[in-house]
Amino acid sequence: MEDNNLNEKLQTLELELKKQSQIAYMNEIVVSSKEKPIVGTVALATCYGIVFYDRKNKIGIVGHASSSKLLSILKEMMTYFTIDKNITIEYAIIPGYDNVINNNYEGLKVLEDYLIKKTPLSVKLIPFKGIELTEDEYGSYSFAFNSQNGLPVTKYLFYSDLKKRGR
């Protein structure tokens, strides 16, 4: 009986979080808002997830970049930086499942090199630690976080998917 009650509560939480979420699909970018503070992506296999998080202003930006669009997605995401004043942006680059399994980090190097060379001096980049990955039944990663507090919500937002896999 308790298990059913817990499952119902987790499914209710999942539905509530989905209403507050924006999910980036292949070659898309999503930006958090007050109405939809949760941002993330799904189905990272050969692609890369890119995250920028302005903790002070509570703005999260997530991009899902295929190998052929790595730099164009990153460049577009960087246009969201407010460069007229000093800001700190937390960032993460998440290689997809296939990249990790095949030890292929070429895209990661391309993205990091571009960030090093092209980040405005008024922007301080530091690593973002709020990413919690799940693996779906097809062998790809998903993640999501709440831009209001920087906390991961992956296991709650994708609860039904994880439950199907018995996790």
Image (tube, rainbow, N blue to C red):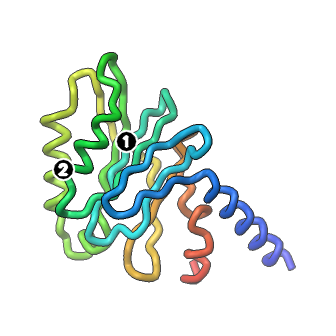
Q: Secondary structure at mark 1?
A: strand
Q: For mark 2, does the 10 Å Cα neighbourhood hold few (<14), some (14 to 19), or many (20 or more) residues?
A: some
Location of residue 119 with respect to 102 vertically, above or below? above
Q: CA distance from mark 1 to mark 2?
A: 15 Å
Where, by quadrant of the figure, is residue 42 drawn? bottom left
Q: For mark 1, what is the residue? A: 52
Location of residue 127 with respect to 103 vertically, above or below? above
Location of residue 64 with respect to 147 vertically, above or below? below
**Quarter of the rendering occupied by the N terminus:** bottom right
Q: Position of residue 46 (x, y in %)?
A: 26, 70
Q: For mark 2, what is the residue? A: 71
Location of residue 110 with respect to 105 vertically, above or below? above
For the point 31% across and 42% down, the residue is 77
Q: Which mark, by number, is residue 160?
A: none
Q: Position of residue 25 (x, y in %)?
A: 39, 62
For the point 80% across and 77% down, the residue is 4
